[in-house]
Amino acid sequence: MASRVNARNVPLANLRALVIVIVVAFHSVLPYLASQPAEPYPFDAAPWRWVAFPIIDRQRFFGFDLFCAWQDISLMSLMFFLAGLFTPASLGRKGSLGYLLDRWWRIGLPFLLAVAILSPLTYFASYRAAAADPSFEAFWRHWLALPMWPAGPAWFLWQLFLLGALFALIHALAPQWLEALHRFAGRYDDRPLAFFATLALLSAIAYVPLALSFSAWDWTFFGPFSFQLSRPAHYLLYFAAGFALGGHGLDRGLLQSDGALARQWPTLLAAAVTGFAAWCYLTSLTFPDWNLSPLANRLAAALAFPPACAAGALSLLAISLRAMRFGDHRLESLSVNAYSIYLLHYAVVVWLQFALLAIALAALVKGAIVLGLGLTSSWAASEGFRRLFALLPGLGKGKETVADQRQ
C-alpha cells in the first residue's frame, strides 16, 4: 500500500505540541480539584484511587475540576486519533514487520522501562504523603503486596502498541481493507459536520453498551496492563478514524489548513461547549454511585459522551488547522519532544506536588508552579537525551529520527 502522507504538516505538529502541554497541565492540577476528599486515598485499600490521584492537597480550585472534566471527555481520544493519523506513513515506509520492530523499540520497551522504574519512583511520593513509615523499604513491601503494578500514564503506550500491531497485521494480510478505509475518509472531504455526526454515532455504538454494562469510570488491571472498561472500543474507533484520514493525506480533505473542517471551527467549538455542558449535567445525575443510579440517568449520561467527545477533539483539530499554521521553534521543539515529555513528566509533576503540600499557597499558584517546572524540566531532559542519542553511533538517525518521533 503506497503512502500518500506528507512527512510535515505544521498545524498538526503544532497541535501535537499543544496536546502535550494540556497533558502536563491536566496531571499538574489533579491534587487541587474541589471534588477530591479531604484526606489522601488509602494506599492499601481498593479501589486504589491514588493511582489516578497520587497527591491530595488541601488547597482547591473548582476551575480545575471543569478543566479536567473537559479533558477527560476528549483528550485521550484525540491522542489516539493523532497516533492513528501518522501510522499510514510509517507503515507505508517501513512495511508491517519493520513498523512492528520500530514500535517495539519506541513504544514497547519504553513502556516496560516506565513501568519498572518510573512508576514506583513516582508513586513513592503518593505513599509517603500518608504513610506511617515513609521509608522506601516499607513502600516496596506495600508496593509488591498490591494486586496490580500501577503503570500511571504509561497505560496509553501498551494500548497504542496493541492498536499499531493490529493495523500492521491488517496491512500485511488485507491491505485492501485499509485502502477502503482511506477511500471512505475521502467521502468527507468537504463534509466536516457529516464526519462529526458519523464519528459520534459510531462512538455511541462502541461506548454506550460498555458504559452501561460496567460503568463510565471503572478500570481493571492485569499486572501493569490497565484499561478503562467503557473505552477500549471507543479508542480503537478514534485510532481508526485518524488512520483513515492520515492515509487519505495529511494535506488533503478534512486536514487541509484552509479546508472545510478548518472553516467550521466556530460551529464545532460551540458544539463542544454545548456537549460538555450537557454531559456535565447528565453525568451529575449519576452521582455519587454510577451503578446505583437509575438506568435512564446512566443511559442519558452515556449517550451524552460520544458527541461531546467528538466535538471536543474535532474543534481542537479545526482550530489548529485554522489558526496554528505558523512555524515556531518552541512549538517545533515541543512537538519533537512530545513523546519523551509524556514519558518523563509524571514523576516530576507528582514529586513537585508532594513538595508543595506543606507550603501555604493558593491552588492556582501551586498548579502554575507544578505546570511550569514540570513542563520545562521534562522538556529540557527530553531535549538533552535526544541530542545525546543523536551523537551516539548507531542511535542517532538525524532527520529520520525527528520525523519518526512525530509518529
Image: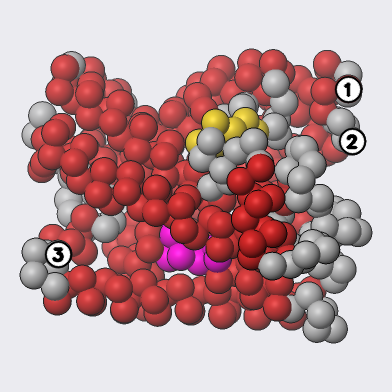
Residues 294 and 263: in front is: 294
Q: Position of residue 248 (x, y in %)?
A: 23, 35
Image position of 260 (left or right of 397): right
Residue at 81% across, 33% down:
282
> Residue 395 shows which numbered tag?
3
CA–CA distance in space, label 3 to label 2: 51 Å
What's under tag 3, amino acid-wise? Leu
Question: Between disc 3 and disc 2, whose residue precedes?
Answer: 2
CA–CA distance in space, label 1 to label 3: 54 Å
Q: Quadrant of residue 185?
A: top left
What's under tag 2, amino acid-wise? Pro
What's under tag 1, amino acid-wise? Leu
Q: Secondary structure at mark 1?
A: helix
Residue at 23% across, 18% down:
177
Image position of 217 (left or right of 291): left
Residue identifier under label 1: 292
Q: Is residue 189 visible?
A: no
Residue identifier under label 2: 288
> Residue 266 shows which numbered tag?
none
Question: Between disc 1 and disc 3, whose residue precedes?
Answer: 1
CA–CA distance in space, label 2 to label 1: 8 Å
Magenta: main secondary structure equals helix
Q: Position of residue 329 (x, y in %)?
A: 31, 79
> Which range is magenta?
341-347
Q: Secondary structure at mark 3?
A: loop
